[in-house]
Image (cartoon, rainbow, N blue to C red):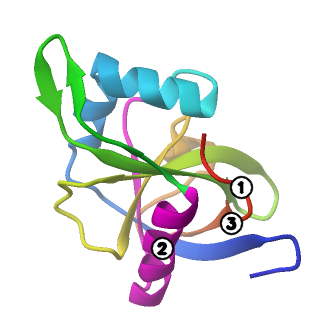
Amino acid sequence: MNDSGKVQITGTVISGLGKGKHFIQLPLYNEIFSQLIGQPPFPGTLNLKVSLEDGRKIERFYHDKGRRYIDLEFNGQKFGDIEVLHAKMTDGNQSIPIVLVRPLLSEHDLTVVEVVASVQLRQHFNLSDGDKITLEIDIEKKAE
């Protein structure tokens, strides 16, 4: 942690399972992420591999500073619960607000972090599998 109450975690870009796109395009989740990032989300997530130690830290941040959406329902259909956490993604030159999301029914372990943003992050930061990128989590601010 640095003096400003922010934690920086570096992750490695990896390919996902392809499910994030489907879920983000569902009206219920799309509305949640639109509210969280202030504009419509890009239809997909960026997956990052982090160390187990950092994955555990992020898990604690979800519980302490994140927000949990439970008992989600849309048009009579139930959807999986999620935890979200505000953060920024930075490559040293530029920074963009993001939301970390953990579906509670996720097939990923703690070392995989899913990221939602208003832009296609791979394109925005010119990322490929294996590239490193930094997450900055403000641990003094609770997600609303």
Magenta range is: 42-65
Say which mark, if any, is on residue 60.
2
Residue 140 lies, with reference to residue 115, above or below; the image says below
Can you identify the residue that label 1 sits on?
A: 141
Q: Which secondary structure lies at badge 2?
A: helix
Query: For residue 126: magenta?
Result: no
- Residue plotted at (32% across, 22% down): 28
Q: Amino acid at mark 2?
A: Arg
Q: Is residue 105 left or right of residue 115?
A: left
Identify the image quadrant of residue 15: bottom left
Residue 31 lies, with reference to residue 56, above or below; the image says above
Q: Is residue 118 left or right of residue 67?
A: right
Which residue lies most toward the left here?
77
Q: Are marks 3 and 1 in contact (CB under 8 Å)?
A: yes
> Which residue is nearer to you in this view: 114 or 120?
114
Gap between marks 1 and 2, in whole Å? 14 Å
- Residue plotted at (43% across, 85% down): 51
How packed mark 3 is, by other alpha carbons closer than 10 Å (few <14, some 14-19, many 20 or more), is many
Q: Position of residue 34 (x, y in %)?
A: 52, 24
Compare marks 1 and 2 and give the one earlier in the sequence.
Answer: 2
Residue 3 lies, with reference to residue 34, above or below; the image says below
> Which residue is nearer to you in this view: 58 or 115?
58
Query: For residue 53: magenta?
Result: yes
- Residue plotted at (82% across, 80% down): 2
Say which mark, if any, is on residue 133.
none
How packed mark 2 is, by other alpha carbons closer than 10 Å (few <14, some 14-19, many 20 or more), is few
Q: Is residue 33 left or right of residue 16?
A: right
Say which mark, if any, is on residue 139.
3
Q: Amino acid at mark 1?
A: Lys
Gap between marks 3 and 2, in whole Å? 10 Å
